[in-house]
Image: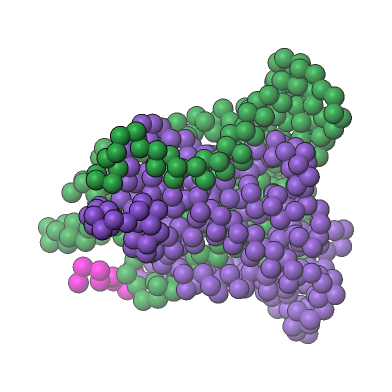
Chain colours: A green, B purple
């Protein structure tokens, strides 16, 4: 291109300076710092020593493997529910019925408000003595006594998932809805002319064409869910008895609440390894999808 | 004809929509009802949805318990706005570079930026905390703004880049022929044409910055006057005896302005969401 043809052009690099500066200061340097800290016994005091792999040995021998397993269980369940409910929601909102424009707007609120505010409301609803869910369940007869959802290991685990799903569903729904609407109408018309039923058209046209979008969203959703902090911290702070302590929560408790920066950093390095793997998969998926984009499928 | 439903299909669709929207909206309805009920009736068993003596009292009395509510709302808005503006100052030139110029390592650099998306503030909280402490930046707006900015840049670059690619190159070539400098071309030719894309990027960045301020404020700030809405109200949530009706009233008042604005920006929000996660 004419503008860029000068040899050894420094202009594009110049354009990248502001963004790169922010990234170096806020992401790259802190990442390096984390890596370095993970080999030290740094805490509140200014003195610290390099301790080799001690932090890693410590966390692997303690409850940490359990925390990893719990994180993946929490994440998989949450992402699966988000994708399931989100797909169903998108199908419903895609139906050409009166009022759909309004319904689409009504889906947005949980996603656009500060996460914490939505969680406050759920905190009230989970209240055992006076909350809505326990109260309703007693009225219908599912429960015969007040039930404090956040006080027991199992119920707290699932309660935090439900709230996470509630916050994540709108985004998944709207994204998949947009994917469905980008499918060319003539595909459906041709199938209709050939006498294909609505169910058949959904199975043979809609579903195959939105599978790439579902895959992309599932992966993005997995990354976001893995990083989830606000919901668990506000509802349970990782309790009761660590039942909702994910890797992120465990790291925060170790480093910020107990000032064990070294041990916290070792946990962060583990988190980065997992997140790195997700991202690699994400790039591979994007590459594959770019080669056979749904829009070329017709 | 194609989209004609039979009556039972209408029933099914509306029933499904009702269940779905109930799940999404019930918490807001409950929050509103709770804000209307006097505290004594909230703490009564068995649970009742509607009680007598419902009133808007909590909306007036809450100012005594949450005197800084306006401040929290302002801070939330202020932090998100500054993040968006600073973010745009990084995003626009970077997206321009990635969309228009051939240079060595271009794809690698772009990949590196996108890879930042896998982190959240929660992952980097330890070194960031120590850095802020070291430079005396704890308890400042800056401590809450800087990390937010870093995490809106990758998505922003990706979004705007795919928008800029579609703008014809002849536009710049014409400006080049007319003797315009390159910065001038970017500011006076490209930015005006790319404005719709920039609007989408700004809104996407603002939503992210507005919805995700909790952990930074919780960790880096302990000055109440600087707290954004989520952390400002968290203090009341965490107490032994939560004044639920006032907390719900304050939460609803706090989110009302953005909800109102978002209804009008709906189109752009969805545009940002879809372009952000797909390829081109």
Front position in the image: B111 or A146: B111
Residue at 58 percent across and 50 percent down: it is B149
Front position in the image: A134 or B126: B126
**Location of residue A134 by image quarter:** bottom right
- Farthest residue, direction top: A52
Q: Is residue B279 left or right of residue B119?
A: left
- Farthest residue, direction front: B179
Residue at 28 percent across and 71 percent down: it is B6
Asked if residue B205 shows in the view, the reply is: yes
Q: Is residue A91 left or right of residue B260?
A: left
Whether residue B271 appears in magenta in the rendering, the answer is no
Please state the total of marks drawn on the protein image: 0
Residue B254: x %, y % from top left: 68, 70
Residue at 40 percent across and 38 percent down: it is A10
Vertical position of residue A273 compared to residue A218: above or below: above
Vertical position of residue B101 compared to residue B15: above or below: above
Front position in the image: A134 or B88: B88
Front position in the image: A171 or A193: A171
**Location of residue B13 by image quarter:** bottom left
Residue at 27 percent across and 40 percent down: it is A5
Query: From which residue to which does the magenta span run?
Result: B1-9
Residue B192: x %, y % from top left: 37, 64
Q: Chief secondary structure of the magenta span?
A: loop
Quarter of the rendering occupied by the N terminus of chain B:
bottom left
Residue A118: x %, y % from top left: 65, 61
């Amino acid at each position: 291109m004419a503008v860029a043809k000068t040899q050894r052009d420094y202009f594009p690099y110049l354009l990248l300076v502001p963004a790169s500066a922010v990234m170096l200061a806020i992401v790259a340097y802190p990442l390096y710092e984390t890596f370095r800290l993970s080999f030290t016994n740094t805490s509140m005091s200014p003195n610290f020593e390099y301790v080799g792999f001690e932090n890693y040995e410590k966390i692997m021998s303690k409850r940490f493997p359990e925390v990893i397993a719990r994180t993946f269980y929490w994440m998989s369940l949450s992402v699966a529910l988000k994708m399931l409910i989100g797909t169903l929601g998108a199908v419903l909102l895609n139906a050409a019925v009166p009022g759909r424009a309004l319904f689409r707007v009504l889906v947005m609120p949980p996603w656009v408000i500060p996460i914490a505010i939505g969680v406050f409301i759920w905190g009230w609803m989970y209240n055992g003595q006076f909350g809505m869910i326990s109260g309703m369940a007693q009225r219908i007869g599912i429960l015969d006594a007040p039930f404090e959802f956040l006080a027991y290991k199992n119920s707290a685990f699932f309660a935090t998932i439900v709230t996470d799903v509630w916050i994540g569903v709108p985004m998944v729904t709207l994204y998949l809805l947009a994917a469905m609407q980008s499918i060319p109408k003539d595909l459906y018309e041709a199938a209709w002319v050939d006498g294909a039923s609505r169910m058949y058209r959904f199975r043979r046209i809609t579903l195959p064409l939105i599978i790439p979008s579902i895959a992309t969203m599932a992966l993005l959703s997995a990354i976001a869910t893995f990083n989830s902090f606000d919901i668990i911290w506000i509802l349970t702070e990782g309790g009761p008895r660590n039942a909702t302590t994910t890797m992120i929560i465990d790291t925060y408790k170790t480093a910020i609440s107990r000032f064990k920066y070294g041990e916290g950093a070792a946990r962060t390095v583990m988190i980065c390894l997992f997140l790195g793997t997700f991202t690699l998969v994400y790039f591979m998926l994007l590459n594959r999808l770019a080669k056979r984009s749904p829009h070329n499928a017709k | 004809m194609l989209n004609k439903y039979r009556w039972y299909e209408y029933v099914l669709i509306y029933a499904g929509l009702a269940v779905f929207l109930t799940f999404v909206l019930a918490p807001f309805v409950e929050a509103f009802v709770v804000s209307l009920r006097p505290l004594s009736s909230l703490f009564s068993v068995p649970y009742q949805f509607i009680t007598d003596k419902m009133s808007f009292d909590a909306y007036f009395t809450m100012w005594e318990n949450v005197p800084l509510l306006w401040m929290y709302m302002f801070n939330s808005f202020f932090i998100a706005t500054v993040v968006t503006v600073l973010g745009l100052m990084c995003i626009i030139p970077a997206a321009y570079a990635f969309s228009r110029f051939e240079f060595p390592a271009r794809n690698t650099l772009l990949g590196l930026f996108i890879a930042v998306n896998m982190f959240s503030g929660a992952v980097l909280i330890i070194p960031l905390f120590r850095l802020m402490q070291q430079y005396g930046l704890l308890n400042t707006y800056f401590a809450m703004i800087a990390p937010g900015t870093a995490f809106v840049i990758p998505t922003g670059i990706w979004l705007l880049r795919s928008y800029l690619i579609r703008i014809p190159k002849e536009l710049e070539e014409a400006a080049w022929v007319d003797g315009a400098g390159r910065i001038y071309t970017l500011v006076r030719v490209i930015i005006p044409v790319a404005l719709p894309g920039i609007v989408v990027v700004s809104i996407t960045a603002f939503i992210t910055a507005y919805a995700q301020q909790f952990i930074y404020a919780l960790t880096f700030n302990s000055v109440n006057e600087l707290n954004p809405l989520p952390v400002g109200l968290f203090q009341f949530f965490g107490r032994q005896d939560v004044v639920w009706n006032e907390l719900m009233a304050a939460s609803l008042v706090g989110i009302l302005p953005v909800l109102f604005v978002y209804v009008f920006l709906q189109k752009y929000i969805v545009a940002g969401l879809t372009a952000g996660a797909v390829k081109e």
